[in-house]
Image (tube, rainbow, N blue to C red):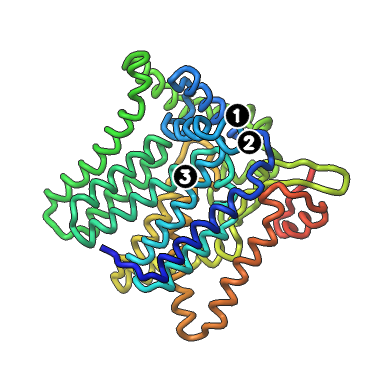
Amino acid sequence: MQKFLTSERYFFTILTIFNLILRTSRLNSPQFTYFDEKNFFVPAANNILKNGIDPEFTLPTFGKMIIALGIKLFGNNYLGWRLPSVIFTTITCLIIYFFAKKLFGGRFIPAMASIIFTFETAWFVHSRIALLEVFLSTFVVAGFYFLWLYLENNNCKDFILAATFFGLGLAVKWSAAFPIITAVLVLFIFKKTKIGYKAKLAAALISLPIVIYFLSYTPLVIKTNFQRFLSLNQKMWQFHTVWIPYNFEKVAPPYIPKFDYVHNIFNNPSSWILNKPITYLEEVNSMDVKEILFIFNPITFWPGLLLIIFSFVKGIQTRNKKLIYLFLIFASSYIPWFFSPRFSIPYYLLFGITALIINLAYYINLVRKKSPIFAYLYIGLIILTFCLFYPVISFSEVKISYLTKLTSIWGLPVY
């Protein structure tokens, strides 16, 4: 059981309050739905509240049920749509602290990891929109956290919690299958026990999430029948494996702003490392513009990518399970998309970015031991970069020239 000092409890309190204030400030900008919260998820959530079931078949139902709960509690407005994402992101920030502390101990690495995460621009954008990726990411990160606890302590309770959280992730999006497969791989690599017992653990780690996935559709089965459940999932499979791959070029432009600019990003995961900004919403008025851009904090993302690869090599050479584990978490958010039959979007990296951030904090601590000033300047640069991007990730009005200068390295067009 991890023990926390009084100073850490104060830090948790301040961290939680700051995250909630940062992410709820101007949450009503815009007051209308946009991007896929407009096209899919808020309408589906309202349908759940009205009819008790989710007829929408592009993604599983549980994430839309979470949004429906937000609307039920806070109303069919910006609070109801987006507050669940704010809460889940804040929870993820705290999990990152616990995870980093369990991996590396001390207080500096966990504190730095949670601070870097707080000022991660892509997570900031998704903490303020009613999309499903934040819910998936929170459950997956929690799953990997409890899986590590199980590997360290051999406590069956931790294993069950890990499988449960992976199952909740699967009930949000099928892409949770990738981290589940990775978790099974981790068991076979890291767990020191007989191969037969490893196989039983793997079977349990696959079976329990599937059971949870089935249970998430209980309201639908009760209101209709099991055949409806099968039909809905068959449609979902066909949508992602057949319809989208063949029709993406035709149907995507009306839904995706600046489609010509982002087209290659969606069809080529290798381009994600360029970290090109993607426009979720834009309003141009003469010389001014209001924008919501999806972009990872460049000061975190590019050094973090290099260091997560370095950690994998170093981990193999020194048999450092912690560094290999972080790399595998990140890899499970990225590598599978090279083999996907459909288009893919850089926000699929969100849960992997948490591992990248913990790994980055580990190296910042090594630098701090030799050059504290350089380490703290780097953290300051991460925060400064977030502040510079804040207007264009929060729909604040700025001069077009400001947006152009800020994104000139990528040549982002402004309409």
**Residue at left 55%, top 28%?**
246
In-image side of 254 versus 8 (left or right): right
Against 407, residue 269 (above or below) is above
In-image side of 80 versus 407 (left or right): left
Tell me if I can see residue 245 in this picture: no
Against 395, residue 18 (above or below) is below
Per the image, label 3 sits on a secondary structure element best described as helix
Q: Residues within 10 Å of mark 2 (few under 14, many from 20)?
A: some
In-image side of 107 versus 395 (left or right): left
The amino acid at mark 2 is Phe
**Residue at left 50%, top 62%?**
14
Q: Quadrant of the C terminus?
A: top right
Tell me if I can see residue 154 in this picture: yes
Q: Nearer the viewer, residue 244 or 405?
A: 405
**What is the spatial separation of the Cα atoms under label 2 and label 1, in whole angstroms?**
7 Å
Percent from the top left, x then y, of residue 388?
A: 70, 61
* Labelled disc at residue 39: 1
- Find out whether the residues at labels 2 and 3 contact each other: C-beta distance under 8 Å: no
**Residue at left 51%, top 21%?**
47
Q: Which residue is mark 3?
A: 337
- Find out whether the residues at labels 2 and 1 contact each other: C-beta distance under 8 Å: yes
The amino acid at mark 3 is Trp
Q: Which residue is mark 2?
A: 35
